[in-house]
């Protein structure tokens, strides 16, 4: 296989990123719980998610090499060229919460984004893998049977494929939870589990990525993952406490 793998003359990153956005949005429209939020409010939340994700993905990228970012701060091309999924997720969260405040929506909306995100991220990672070395999402050199030569004669961890496999398994687990007969969940529970699972995976997988690790042997993405994990752990403890109290007071097995 010669990288990048063009498909019908289209660069794989452009093709699969476009498909990720298109199909992910269609999955959102198909799977969202329409009785939980009116469509006009849902679209505003999607807009908030998109803008937040775009800003967050670039902001985290700028901290990959802080000295270079300081040196290139006035070069627009550098500031716009990079992005990260972790930054996109965390920035998207901020964008959604901001949009909810603007439109006056107080209920959680995260559960509706779980499966669109998983599908979109899996599709996007296919494009990252087929792009090869120029995408900078591959892993460190390895002798494992999974090693892939991206064109320079060195076998590396195909971390893009590892991520696709992880997201597939995570999606199955979350789907089983969502469709379980027992509805002992609170609003946002699935999204919180998704974020905890994915951030934990990225925290570990980035140890086998050849990116700078200037922050006490951690890189920029791992720092963002740790911040996100701390946030969601404390949030889930808080929600669990509220959920238990709600059961005691109302006897309901589903907390709003």
Image (cartoon, helix red, strand yellow):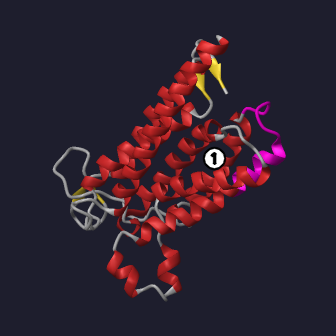
In screen coordinates, is 45 left or right of 236? right
In screen coordinates, is 246 left or right of 161? right
- Tell me the crowding category of disc 1: few under 14, some 14 to 19, or many 20 or more residues within 10 angstroms, Cα based: many
Residue 177 position in % (x across, y down): 53, 22
Q: Main secondary structure of the magenta part?
A: helix
76 versus 164 height, above or below:
below
Please name the residue that numbered disc 1 is placed on. 24
Residue 156 position in % (x across, y down): 25, 56
Residue 186 position in % (x across, y down): 60, 27
Q: Quadrant of residue 245?
A: top right
Q: Nearer the viewer, residue 54 or 165?
A: 54
Q: Quadrant of residue 27?
A: top right
Q: Nearer the viewer, residue 195 or 122?
A: 195
Question: In percent of the image, x 26 and y 63: which residue is there?
Answer: 210
Residue 71 part of the magenta-drawn span: no
In screen coordinates, is 10 left or right of 102? left
Q: Which residues are magenta?
A: 33-47
């Amino acid at each position: 296989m010669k990288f990048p793998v063009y498909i019908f003359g289209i660069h794989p990153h452009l093709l699969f990123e476009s498909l990720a956005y298109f199909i992910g949005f269609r999955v959102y429209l198909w799977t969202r719980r329409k009785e939980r939020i009116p469509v006009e409010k849902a679209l505003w939340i999607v807009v908030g998610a998109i803008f937040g994700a775009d800003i967050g993905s670039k902001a985290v990228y700028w901290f990959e090499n802080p000295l270079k970012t300081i040196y290139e701060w006035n070069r627009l091309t550098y500031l716009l060229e990079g992005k990260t999924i972790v930054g996109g997720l965390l920035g998207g969260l901020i964008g959604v919460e901001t949009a909810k405040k603007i439109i006056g929506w107080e209920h959680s909306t995260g559960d509706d984004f779980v499966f669109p995100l998983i599908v979109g991220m899996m599709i996007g990672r296919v494009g990252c893998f087929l792009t090869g070395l120029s995408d900078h999402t591959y892993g460190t050199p390895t002798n494992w049977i999974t090693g892939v030569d991206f064109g320079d004669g060195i076998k590396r961890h195909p971390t893009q494929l590892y991520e696709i496999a992880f997201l597939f398994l995570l999606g199955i687990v979350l789907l089983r939870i969502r469709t379980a007969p027992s509805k002992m969940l609170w609003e946002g529970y699935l999204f919180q589990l998704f974020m905890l699972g994915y951030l934990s995976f990225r925290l570990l997988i980035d140890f086998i990525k050849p990116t700078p690790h200037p922050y006490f042997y951690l890189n920029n993405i791992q720092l963002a993952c740790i911040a996100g994990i701390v946030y969601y752990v404390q949030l889930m403890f808080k929600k669990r406490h509220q959920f238990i109290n709600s059961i005691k007071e109302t006897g309901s097995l589903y907390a709003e």
